[in-house]
Amino acid sequence: MDFNNLFLFFMFQFILIIGCSSSGVRLDIQDKHVIMDNGIVQVNISNPEGHVIGIQYNGIDNLLEVQNKESDRGYWDIVWEQGGEKRTEKGVKKKGILDRMETNNLTVIVENEEQVELSFTRIWNFSLEGKLAPLNFDKRFIMLRDSSGFYTYAIYEHSKEWPAFDLDNTRVAFKPRKDKFNYMVIADDRQRFMPLPDDRLPGRGEVLAYKEAVRLVNPVEPEFKGEVDDKYEYSIESRKNQVHGWISINSSESKSTGFWIITPSNEFRSAGPLKQYLASHVGPTSLSVFHSTHYSGADLIMEFGVNEPWKKVFGPIFIYLNSDSDGLSPINLREDAKHQMVNEVESWPYTFPASKDFLSSAQRSKVEGRLLVRDRFIGDAFVPVKGAYVGLAPPGDVGSWQAECKGYQFWTITDDKGYFSIINILPGDYNLFSWVNGFIGDYQYDKVINITSGSEIKLGELVYEPPRDGPTLWEIGIPDRSAAEFYIPDPNPLYVNKLYLNHSDRYRQYGLWERYGELYPKEDLVYNVGTSDYKKDWYFAQNTRKKDNNTYKGTTWQINFNLDHVNTNGTYKLRLALASVHFAELQVRINNSDANPPLFTTEVIGKDNTIARHGIHGMYRLYNVDVQGSLLVKGNNTIFLTQASSNGPFVGILYDYIRLEGPPQIHFTDQLDIF
């Protein structure tokens, strides 16, 4: 084809695209389906159930898995149970019920050339008690002119007089075609070609310690043989969970196609910026999870009482589709999706959702201030903090934001001078919370902040004084709510995910809980202050050790240190910041491993399940233990940290940071000697 013909061809394609899009958005309502079409994307939704059953784009009749049932391609769902005593069985909460939230009524909210918005609703009544969650559910879909994708959001409502119930999880799920979408992108450094779901089936896959983890023994494509596939290896923190998805890359096709979930705001997600969620994984599956108990446990179940009214808007999120003529490289599509994500974030709050429950920018507010830190044993100065998270969440105790689920949260990061501006805040009552990397504990502003529509609140300078009684005698780790700085071993070669070889997220490999017993087969970890290096000598998880009879036992770690002076009448302070705990009991003893009772115990705490799910943090906890000087001696001392629980391989503790402080009257020069 010569240059003139090539030019005419591309001009024709351009005119064709413009002509299609200039016709605006069209709506076609059929008996069992409703179709939104803007000339770029066509979305087919079941009527009145409200499931996305087809997405036509880039010459592909349906991007979603056509072999699945119509209710298993693109859908909203919840996991719920009846509340209170009705859920408890033999003292244990029953497992929740999965509901794909099929609706029974369609209403066209907006229909013009610029926009179509559809509402699929299900209204609860008492005849449904015990059968369906007591929720009114309004599921919305929006298509705009010239938009390469579509939006979805939903309004959940529980009326005051309705029965109690628990909401465990809620999300949107999409399942692209497995014969096309073979390359998954979670982040710039977490992307790869993926195995097929068939590889997880018996004969091709070997189920490991739990059903989600499968070793691929005879995969369709030999390159994946020997790898472990587990959806939890691809979890992502809320603060980083803005765009992820799948790409169809095939050497026989001239174009590659991208399928992306873009989340422009985290205000409707539960539990703040550090909460971890499932994202994309083998299926192919892409999720937008708004609320879950993963990496947190039952503490994050939303429990609604009989007389508790509640309403919340989840979303909108954007399902973005793109294509590239270079069908063998994912780079262009990934960069384009990131650019689109920035556009969506900058457009938040959107102007086009028609529900009155989604408030506009003019109805929202702003809170500004400056955060300073003063640690009196470092110095008397009030130091501005760069990169601290500052946020608004419904009123609660210090640190309650990490378990807050029912309301909205709004977070930002301080600049290099400590200034912050929290924008687009919905009306209501809030506490202001913060945490600062490099310092233990949580900050909470001492007043409830009432936000009204269109207001702007200036708080001035706020000072966080982190917990501190005396000077630091020694410390282990970095106070950043994570165990990532500690020693993380190589995985067993039988259980490798190649993505995480030579990767900063080495903790995401399967089976690391078994490696502790292999590295410490008889004696537990011993850490010598001054000579040991926490990066090499402090194992990232204090979990159980397997015994010969396939039972498990707790472990006791030792911290050895020297003191050249002891104030026997003073009180020392041991700070124990925990990054995650799962059904563990931490006991502290000083210079006597057999002391009974121990100096301190947490009792059995935590349901994070972080170790099994390849995480490096869960729910943050801080314990402050008084150590009487009479328990210490001049010279060699040992702190024994016992994880006493033994119920299986996933029980354990991930430490964030440990510090021993001297009594307040000890001078800085009265420090310790080194081994």
Image (spheres, rainbow, N blue to C red):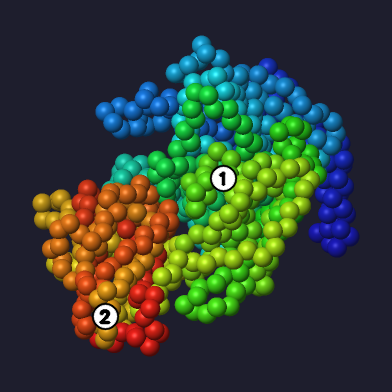
Instruction: Note whether 568 is above or below 256 in the view shown.
Output: below
Of pointers 1 and 2, the one earlier in the residue sequence: 1
Q: Quadrant of the C terminus?
A: bottom left
The amino acid type, in three-letter code, at marker 2 is Val
Q: Which residue is mark 1?
A: 395
Q: Position of residue 507 (x, y in %)?
A: 39, 63
Q: Quadrant of the N terminus?
A: bottom right
* Left or right of residue 1: residue 636: left
Tell me if I can see residue 343 in this picture. Answer: no
Q: Nearer the viewer, residue 29 or 412?
A: 412
Which one is nearer the viewer's eye here, 659 or 342?
659
Q: CA distance from mark 1 to mark 2?
A: 43 Å
Query: Nearer the viewer's eye, disc 1 or disc 2?
Result: 2
Q: Is residue 516 above or below residue 60?
A: below
Q: Position of residue 335 (x, y in %)?
A: 67, 61
Crowd tier of the residue under label 2, counting other residues whose Cα lies within 10 Å: few below 14, some 14–19, many 20 or above: many
Secondary structure of the residue carrying tag 2 is loop
Q: Residue at x 22, y 82 (%)?
A: 634
Q: Residue furthest top?
A: 127
Residue 241 percent across, percent down from the top left:
57, 53
> Circles 1 and 2: CB distance less than 8 Å?
no
Residue type highlighted by circle 1: Pro
Q: Residue at x 56, y 15 (%)?
A: 125
User: Which label is found at residue 566?
Assistant: 2
Residue drawn at 64 percent across, 58 percent down:
412
As drawn, is 546 to the left or to the right of 671? left
The extreme front residue here reads 569
Q: Could you tell whether 66 is left or right of 566 in the image?
A: right
SS at mark 1 in the image = loop
Residue that appears at 58% across and 44% down: 394
Q: Is residue 495 above or below residue 101?
A: below
